[in-house]
Amino acid sequence: MNYLLQTIFEKEYRFVPVADVFQATHQLRINKQIGALIVDVDFQPQQSWELIQHIKSSRLFKIPVIVLATENNDSVKQKSYEFELDEIFFKPFNPVDLIAAIKNLTSETMLSNV
């Protein structure tokens, strides 16, 4: 999935792929210019949802969170509502829609931080 996302975003964005939740947490601590977080909850589901919960409940992070998931089921929908996700995409998704969501969310974040 990282290769696909890197291919999608390489022309317009700096994409920082990570292998797991620990690396994601590390990148969030050291890189203050992260404009959005894309989380594939199919990989390490419990840890992924815990990371999302931490990001969305913390006052330290004001970044949009986009979730990628395989199944469009009630559990994913409930968690997306509970954690107030900014966007959710179910696989297979249209890369053009994902790029549009990133553009929209990052421009909203930039405006709200002014």
Image: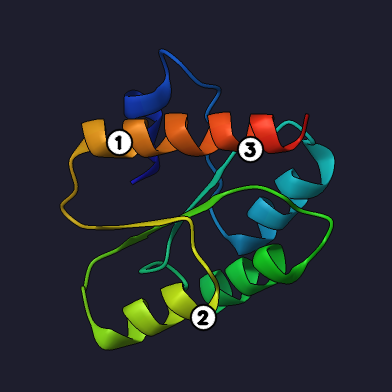
Q: Which mark lies nearer to you, 3 or 1? A: 3
Residue ID for mark 1: 4
- In this view, the residue in front, 2 or 70, is 70
Q: Residue at x 21, y 73 (%)?
A: 71
Q: Quadrant of residue 112?
A: top right
Please tell me whether residue 56 is drawn above or below residue 86 in the rendered image: below
Amino acid beneath label 2? Glu
Q: Determine the secondary structure under disc 1.
A: helix
Instruction: Give the CA distance from mark 2 to mark 1.
Output: 28 Å
Q: Residue at x 49, y 63 (%)?
A: 85
What x and y, as percent, mark residue 42?
Answer: 35, 69
Residue 4 lies left or right of residue 58; in this view the side is: left
Residue ID for mark 3: 109
Instruction: Give the CA distance from mark 3 to mark 1.
Output: 24 Å
In the picture, which quadrant includes the C terminus?
Answer: top right
Mark sitting earlier along the chain (3/1): 1
The label on residue 47 is none
The label on residue 82 is 2
Please tell me whether residue 90 is drawn above or below residue 15 in the rendered image: below
Q: Residue at x 40, y 25 (%)?
A: 9
Amino acid beneath label 1? Leu
What x and y, as percent, mark residue 103?
Answer: 44, 29
The mark tally for this picture is 3
Q: Quadrant of residue 79?
A: bottom left
Please tell me whether residue 25 is drawn above or below residue 70 in the rendered image: above
Does any portion of residue 17 appear in the rendered image? yes
* Neighbourhood count class around disc 3 (C-alpha, 10 Å): few under 14, some 14–19, many 20 upward: some
Please tell me whether residue 34 is drawn above or below residue 59 in the rendered image: above
Instruction: Give the CA distance from mark 2 to mark 3.
Output: 21 Å
Amino acid beneath label 3? Thr
